[in-house]
Image: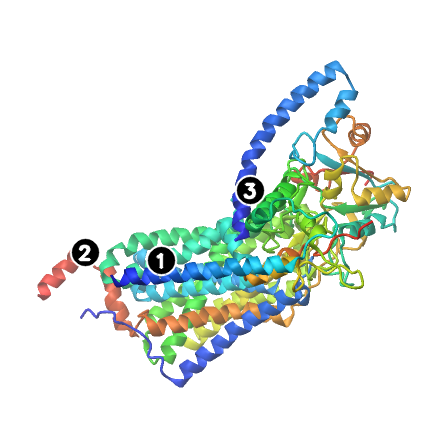
Amino acid sequence: MMKIVDYVEIEGRSIGYWVLLAILGAGAAAGLGASYYMEHHGHWVTGMSNQIVWGTPHVFAVFLIVAASGALNVASIASVFNRVMYKPLSRFSGLLAIALLIGGLAVLVLDLGRPDRLVVAMTSYNFKSIFTWNIFLYTGFVVIVAAYLWMMMERRMNRYSKPVGMFAFVWRLALTTGTGSIFGFLVARQAFDAAVMGPMFVVMSFSYGLAFFILLLMWTYHMSGRTLGDAILLRLKNLLGVFIAGVLYFVLAYHLTNLYAAEHRGVEQFILVSGGIYTQAFWIGVVMLGSIVPFLIFHLPSTEKSRLGIAVGSVLVILGGIAHIFVIIVGGQAYPLVIFPGKEIIESSFFDGQVASYAPSLPEVILGVSGIAIALLLVSIAIKVLRFLPDSLADDVVFSVGSDAVLGEEEKAAASSAGA
Amino acid sequence: MSDNLTSVKQSKLTVSSNNVDRRGFLSSVSAIAAVTVAPGVALVGFAEARSVDKEPVTDARRWGMLIDSSRCVRGCDACVSACGKENGLASYSRPQTDVQWVRKVTVRDTRTRRITSLPVMCQHCQDPPCVDVCPTGASFRRTDGIVLVDRHICIGCRYCMMACPYKARSFAHESANNQKSHAPRGKGTVEACTFCVHRVDENSDRTPACVEACAAQGHGAMVFGDLNDPNSQLSKDLDKYSSTELRGDMGLNPGVRYRNI
Amino acid sequence: MRKFWLFFVLAVVSTAVSGFVFAGQENALLSGGAVSKWKGDACVEATPVMRREHMDFLLKQRDETMRQGIRNGPYSLKGCIECHAQEDEQGQEIPVNASGQFCQECHQYVAVSIDCFQCHVATSEPRK
């Protein structure tokens, strides 16, 4: 009765596939062009300024980096937590993790003031900087996950996949904590300076990474005409529901802590009540569309088993995630620095005490979105070239694999000897 | 490639700064000796001792500033324009992205309604957050307390601008032109007030352009000097008057202090 | 054995090419003559030393100046420019990185792109 999971490349000969590659390639090229335009003229052609120093490119870059570490979760569940049912998904999970990270890093690097000095960032370090830690965490992540993929895909190395998977899991926790700490350690700014940022980013990564994973899994199986059973999809969906609630819990903890301290009430008032676009992005984007609506879709009896519902819910989680990072990064900068507590600023030539305005320009939006294109381009090529995806994830395949977990090693041995 | 050299050199520099400490110690010993022999005269001699041709700056000095906001005149921006002129800062009439190394701010106390005006620039902290967060080590603090950006290895990530509590740093959003040869600056890197380090290095009696301009206006709201030298006007003023630091809650020990805010 | 011949040919070719480059460099520089009209006729070091090591001198002094405040050293970029910047017919200084000028002529020849002048001004301060 045991079915063997058969990993097969997608055929990738249809016109649709090449059109997709062309579109994604064009997206990546547009990002490079946008970057060149920004670097050639200088950053004044963007909406970023001395007030909003990190803008749309950073929102997309951080989102992709956070989602990348989360995308690895499915593999971690299989190899670290022994849920064998998820095992057939592990390879794709690792691939997605690498692709999303590279997409995010590309955007981050292309937005630097001097991207031509990337080699400086690789040779000259200040080890007190969280950025420096992250440079190692990110490059290390790619190397470790690539090794993990090798362990999983090379039969001889299979036995090492568990320890390597364990290491990758620990590394990704460190990575996302590091990413959150980029903001958490910024003691000067009212909206940042919170230790909860690190753990909050970890849970955010669970959520966004899994949403990306579900969406791409459904899409590739649909497009390649393979079977994706309900069993695995519904489990992934339920897990995403838990992660959504987890993110909301951290958001609640963060804002409650700030609301309690008088010195932070200004920034809370700004984000939660009077911040215009940031307030809307928070309540409508993060809370309503990004959390409550998908949670309801995933759990209401009428939609909980609907594939369309799962797809829509995952898209909403992703959009809500981008909104969340936008509120954190741009909203956190839009609220002015409090240099003179107890004083109001009535004149300044440098926008002190004023809420900063930010209108992203087209090139920076293109650059940001191109990160997603780069990630998807890598995935599209990789699944054609290498065997990442099982040719079927029908329920009987998944469950026959899953039953391994239920049976112990001895029972399995007994079963196989009885069969022989 | 050249930047590799930089990092090698930097490590050499760290080594030599250890020597500096020893030298600093020896010279303070000799200074004490000198004080016992010839008070006053010897101290002045010591303060002038560094030869800019050969000797590195040491932590025997710490440059600082005291700004008296009661003497700072609302509407006067002599310091700001002097800074722009001295350092070749161009304005493109795009206030959101134009650089500002020093700016004028007018504040009103929300309870007492008292209005004060004051310039804000890089506060040259003892523990600068910009230096902590800089990934390449481009943000650095000279041993004499001046916080600078090494624009040869700045990659333009702007993390320092996120970290600075004073909004003291600007990003060069445009290609630079008409730079001064003592103040190189270029597109895509971060820059800030240097305490007019080129002036201070040439002659320790010279003051930054803003201080000079403020004095020339007859306001004299800014006093520049060596915080470590008890005989400097700055130290005497700090002894005499109460002063405060911006964002004192952060414990950064800035080199710039304020009176009568 | 085939490998040996491959290496041998490579070695011969590279020696020949580098010989030409050096010879060419001599020619280019000797004929150029874009040198000081202000400060006498000798550079801070002998010409062969400067050709080989000027970049190291510059980088070392730059770090000492910037990080340690040691000013007025002999190897400053400012010093290069003060001596080597030429004037056009109107008496206007030509940037040293303009085509055919002192810095650019040589670096262009050896295909080295320098980014000094993205930040540093390529002319000297007006002489008082």
Q: Is residue C63 left or right of residue B116?
A: left
Across and down, in percent, residue B69 comes to: 84, 41
Local secondary structure at mark 2? helix
Q: Amino acid at mark 1?
A: Ser
Amino acid at circle 3: Gln
Identity of the residue furthest to the top in this view: B37
Instruction: Report whether B65 appears left or right of C97.
Output: right
SS class of the residue under badge 3?
A: helix
Q: Amino acid at mark 2?
A: Glu
| Residue located beneath label 1 in the image | A76
Q: Where is mark 3, residue-wise?
A: B10
Q: CA distance from mark 3 to mark 2?
A: 58 Å
Q: Is residue A84 visible?
A: no
Helix, strand or loop at label 1? It is helix
Determine if residue A191 is in view.
yes
Residue linked to disc 2: A409
Q: Position of residue B91 (x, y in %)?
A: 77, 60
Instruction: Check the image and report above or below for B202 versus A382.
Output: above
Of labels 2 and 1, earlier in sequence is 1
